């Protein structure tokens, strides 16, 4: 007598998950479809469970290269549970594979509103920015579909970011180290990045920090190996009180140049604003080892020390 066939939603989903892990994507698709039909036949309202099943089936479609059905399932999942991370990322990947770059950009950007430390979305934004500049020219942002505004309740809180963020960055650094040859920028890209950075610097001098961020971001889409571009963009984020983004950019700047004094100082400022005083104090201490007579850093150290005591 053969094994009992799965018949409950939980059993079908678990079986689908196992098939997916085994690389049997077609079989997993069938099991998730059966789970969906079973759930819908029960008549009860369970949008979260239904959304997960659509998102899981979408992952199977994506693995099989069936991008159109992946997009349909992700859209269904998001209709049930708006601003869910996995269907947004999977739909973005499918749009990108179909060369629907504006739509992919919107989904990656939406993910970054929810959690601005997701490495795959950060990398996706860089790829899409480069593709859109080539496809639509310098005014490409004006030709994008509208980007939905993610409510604060759906955004990831800062206090849960650092550990996960550093894990993501560690993975990203490893990938970048092992694939640096394929990611090398051409001489033309490097020059274009330099010009855009200088345009950003001029905007900062005029106090136009929002536009400067756009220029620095565009610069980084052509070459992301310039530490100063990240620390300059961090200055703009600080001016706009976008402290999480400022800290993230400083971390990237320091990954490229561990002695970037401006990045250490600006990250210390961001951490202080986020009330992460220990991290702020650690950055100031590192800075003062490099520049013991740095007056602004000494003043900031005193302020942070008062908050710690």
Image (spheres, helix red, strand yellow):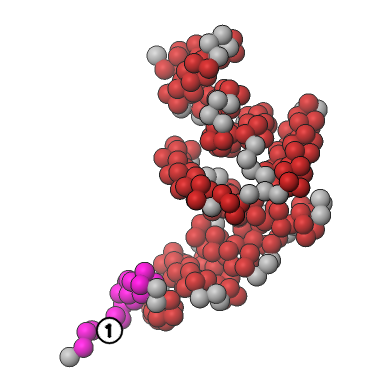
Q: Residue furthest bottom?
A: 1
Q: Where is residue 109 in the image (x, y as percent from the top left)?
A: 62, 52
Q: Position of residue 194 (x, y in %)?
A: 75, 38
Q: Residue at x 45, y 69 (%)?
A: 56
Q: Is residue 169 visible?
A: yes
Q: Is residue 104 above or below residue 289?
A: below
Viewer-side residue, 126 vs 8 = 126
Q: Where is residue 87 in the image (x, y as percent from the top left)?
A: 52, 63
All told, the count of numbered labels is 1
Q: Where is residue 192 in the image (x, y as percent from the top left)?
A: 77, 44
Viewer-side residue, 125 vs 290 = 290
Q: Residue at x 79, y 36 (%)?
A: 199
Q: Which residue is drawn at 53% across and 29% down?
A: 258
In terms of image quadrants, where is residue 269? top right
Which residue is tagged 1?
5
Task: State the extent of the magenta-drawn residues as a range.
Answer: 2-22
- Are there few (<14), some (14-19), or many (20+) residues within 10 Å of tag 1? few
For residue 6: magenta? yes
Viewer-side residue, 7 vs 206 = 206
């Amino acid at each position: 007598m053969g094994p009992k066939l799965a018949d409950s939603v939980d059993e079908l989903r678990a079986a689908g998950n196992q098939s997916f892990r085994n690389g049997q994507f077609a079989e997993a698709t069938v099991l998730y479809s059966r789970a969906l039909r079973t759930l819908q036949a029960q008549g009860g309202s369970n949008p979260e469970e239904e959304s997960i099943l659509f998102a899981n089936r979408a992952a199977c479609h994506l693995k099989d290269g069936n991008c159109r059905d992946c997009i349909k399932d992700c859209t269904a999942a998001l209709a049930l549970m708006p601003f869910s991370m996995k269907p947004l990322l999977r739909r973005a990947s499918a749009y990108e594979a179909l060369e629907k770059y504006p739509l992919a950009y919107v989904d990656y950007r939406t993910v970054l509103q929810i959690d601005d430390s997701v490495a795959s979305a950060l990398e996706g934004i860089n790829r899409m920015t480069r593709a859109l500049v080539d496809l639509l020219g310098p005014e490409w942002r004006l030709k994008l579909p509208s980007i939905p505004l993610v409510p604060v309740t759906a955004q990831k809180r800062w206090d849960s970011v650092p550990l996960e963020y550093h894990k993501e960055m560690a993975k990203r650094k490893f990938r970048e180290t092992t694939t640096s040859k394929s990611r090398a920028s051409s001489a033309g890209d490097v020059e274009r990045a330099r010009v855009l950075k200088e345009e950003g610097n001029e905007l900062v001098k005029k106090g136009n920090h929002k536009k400067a961020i756009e220029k620095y971001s565009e610069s980084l889409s052509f070459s992301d190996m310039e530490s100063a571009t990240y620390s300059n963009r961090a200055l703009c984020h600080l001016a706009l009180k976008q402290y999480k983004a400022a800290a993230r950019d400083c971390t990237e700047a320091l990954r490229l140049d561990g002695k970037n004094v401006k990045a250490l100082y600006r990250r210390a400022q961001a951490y202080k604003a986020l009330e992460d005083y220990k991290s702020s104090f650690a950055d100031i201490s590192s800075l003062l080892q490099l520049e013991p007579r740095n007056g602004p850093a000494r003043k900031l150290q005193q302020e942070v020390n008062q908050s710690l005591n």
